[in-house]
Amino acid sequence: MPEGDTVWRQARNLDAALRGRALTGCDFRVPALATVDFTGRVVASVRSRGKHLLMAVHEPAAASPGHVIHSHLAMEGTWDIYPAGPGRDPRWRRPAHTARAVLRTEDAVVVGYSLGTLEVWTDAEAGHALDHLGPDLLGPDWDAREALRRLTAGPDRPVGLALLDQRNLAGIGNIYRNELCFLGRVHPETPVAGVPELPRLVELAKRLLEANKDRPGRSTTGGPARGDAAVWVYGLAGRPCKRCGTLIRHGKLADPTTPTHAARDIYFCPRCQPGP
């Protein structure tokens, strides 16, 4: 599941493959962008902002980017990079019908699969489109005090919802939300005002994403980045807690501030994380 560390790593890899290179092909496979073609444009940079990926492109002679290709990986999206050139035609790692964007340079083919969001912004639009996001845990604007200020502005809100809200701090997804609550010994439904060690949770969030941003597999336990050893509680309902042996429970936590009131999975140890 892509979270802030995954998007940061993909942006770094895409930037290394594309920065300063002209696009020799551009194929957006979504109806809204069917007529958009950036062939001949130069990629100025690729960067992440929380869980958003931003690819700036400009005319070869222009001094500044003219457009930004914005994508969000949602639950299953990814960008893959394949070598290009004479005699090279590598097999794609995912089915072609899941491709939403195919960008080509002389040395690489970059494919965006199953992207939750794919759109193009002008420079002016890109300048303010993500202003609603909180401090980026892996960005140059990271500010722990501002993140805490935003979190505590809703004292009655369940901490499990507040941590997941990208307007408070950007980069935490559902895996990190559950793991942070376990590490902080707090039930996800506990109101923010009832979490005395909220600054420690914010510090832990920063440490976990920093520790995982260069890893191909994520681990919140310090153990191997695969399977049950990689997590404390996420996805482990019915398994014994690694701290106390109590069986881990599963529930749902809905956010009434979202249009769909979508409920997300929560996992917790009832002994280590007593309910509010």
Image: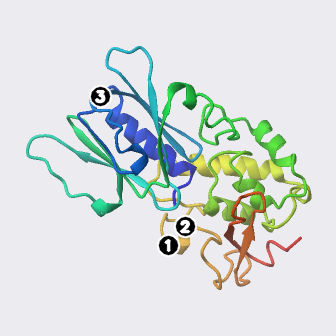
| Residue identifier under label 1 | 227
Please name the residue shown 45% across and 29% down the image: 67
Q: Is residue 189 left or right of residue 125?
A: right
Q: Dot 3 surroundings within 10 Å: few (below 14), some, or many (20 or more)?
A: many
Please tell me whether residue 108 is drawn above or below residue 233 in the rendered image.
Answer: above
Q: Quadrant of residue 103?
A: top left
- Percent across and percent down for residue 180 are 70, 60
Q: Dot 1 surroundings within 10 Å: few (below 14), some, or many (20 or more)?
A: few
Q: Is residue 123 left or right of residue 206?
A: left
Tag 1 near tag 2, CB within 8 Å: yes
- Residue 38 vs residue 194, the one in the foreground: 38
Tag 3 near tag 2, CB within 8 Å: no
Q: Quadrant of residue 12?
A: top left
Please name the residue shown 36% across and 35% down the image: 16
- Percent across and percent down for residue 74 are 53, 57
Please tell me whether residue 15 is drawn above or below residue 155 in the rendered image.
Answer: above
Please tell me whether residue 58 is drawn above or below residue 76 in the rendered image.
Answer: above
Give the quarter of the figure containing the C terminus. Answer: bottom right
Q: Earlier in the sequence, mark 3 or mark 2?
A: 3
| Residue identifier under label 3 | 21
Q: Is residue 101 left or right of residue 273?
A: left
Residue type at mark 3?
Arg
Please name the residue shown 74% across and 45% down the image: 168
Residue type at mark 2?
Ala
Residue type at mark 1?
Gly
| Residue identifier under label 2 | 230
Coloring scheme of the render? rainbow
Q: Dot 2 surroundings within 10 Å: few (below 14), some, or many (20 or more)?
A: some
- Residue 85 vs residue 104, the one in the foreground: 104
Please name the residue shown 72% across and 35% down the image: 143
